[in-house]
Image: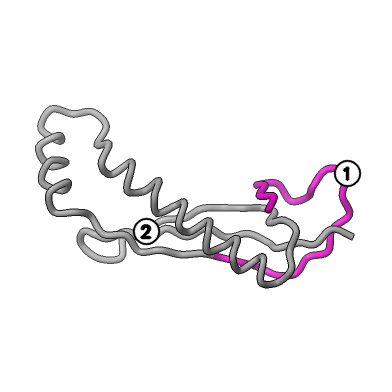
Amino acid sequence: MLLVNIEYIPGKEIEALGMVKGTVVQSKNFGKDFMAGMKTLVGGEITSYTEMLNEARQIAVKRMVDEAEAMGADAVINVRYGSSSVMQGAAEVIAYGTAVKYR
């Protein structure tokens, strides 16, 4: 499945099938959360959170691609990501775009 964050696929005529999305709500691990809190005292990247969000993005993209494949899509264009805090200690990540089929 081709994923692009532009509104077209160079050299291809496409038919829009509809919007597709994948979401996941990921919670922080208490042990990692404690260590992240300690890291804020000295500064720097909180790698456990970076890894958590990367994993959440991968899950969201997989769900988006699954939805596009179910529609018979060849690609998803205009792919975007979003995130928000759902509750204390949990974040939602969404991947969305337009499923298209080549003509």
Q: Are marks 2 and 1 in contact (CB under 8 Å)?
A: no
Q: Nearer the viewer, residue 80 or 61?
A: 61
Question: Label 2, on which residue?
Answer: 84
- Estimate the x, y position of residue 25 in percent, counting from the top left: 35, 64
* Quadrant of the image occupied by residue 59: bottom left
Q: What residue do we see at 10% from left, 46% from top?
A: 34
Left or right, 73 with respect to 42, comes to: right
User: Around disc 2, counting alpha carbons within 10 Å, would you say few (fewer than 14), some (14 to 19), or many (20 or more)?
Assistant: few
How many marks are shown on the rendered structure? 2
Left or right, 92 with respect to 11, comes to: left
Left or right, 86 with respect to 79, comes to: left
Residue at disc 2, secondary structure: strand
Q: Quadrant of the C terminus?
A: bottom right
User: Around disc 1, counting alpha carbons within 10 Å, would you say few (fewer than 14), some (14 to 19), or many (20 or more)?
Assistant: few
In magenta stretch: residue 4: yes
Does 18 sit above or below residue 28? Answer: below
Does 71 sit above or below residue 6? Answer: below
Q: Which tag, 2 or 1, sits closer to the chain's start?
A: 1
Q: Which residues are magenta?
A: 1-21
Q: Nearer the viewer, residue 53 or 81?
A: 53
- Estimate the x, y position of residue 5 in percent, counting from the top left: 65, 47
Which amino acid type is marked by label 1? Gly
- Estimate the x, y position of residue 99 in percent, counting from the top left: 70, 63
* Quadrant of the image occupied by residue 27: bottom left
Question: Label 1, on which residue?
Answer: 11
* Quadrant of the image occupied by residue 90: bottom left
What coloring was used for the rendering?
A: one colour
Q: What residue do we see at 24% from left, 36% from top?
A: 46
In magenta stretch: residue 16: yes
The image's mark for residue 40 is: none
Q: What residue do we see at 53% from left, 58% from top?
A: 62
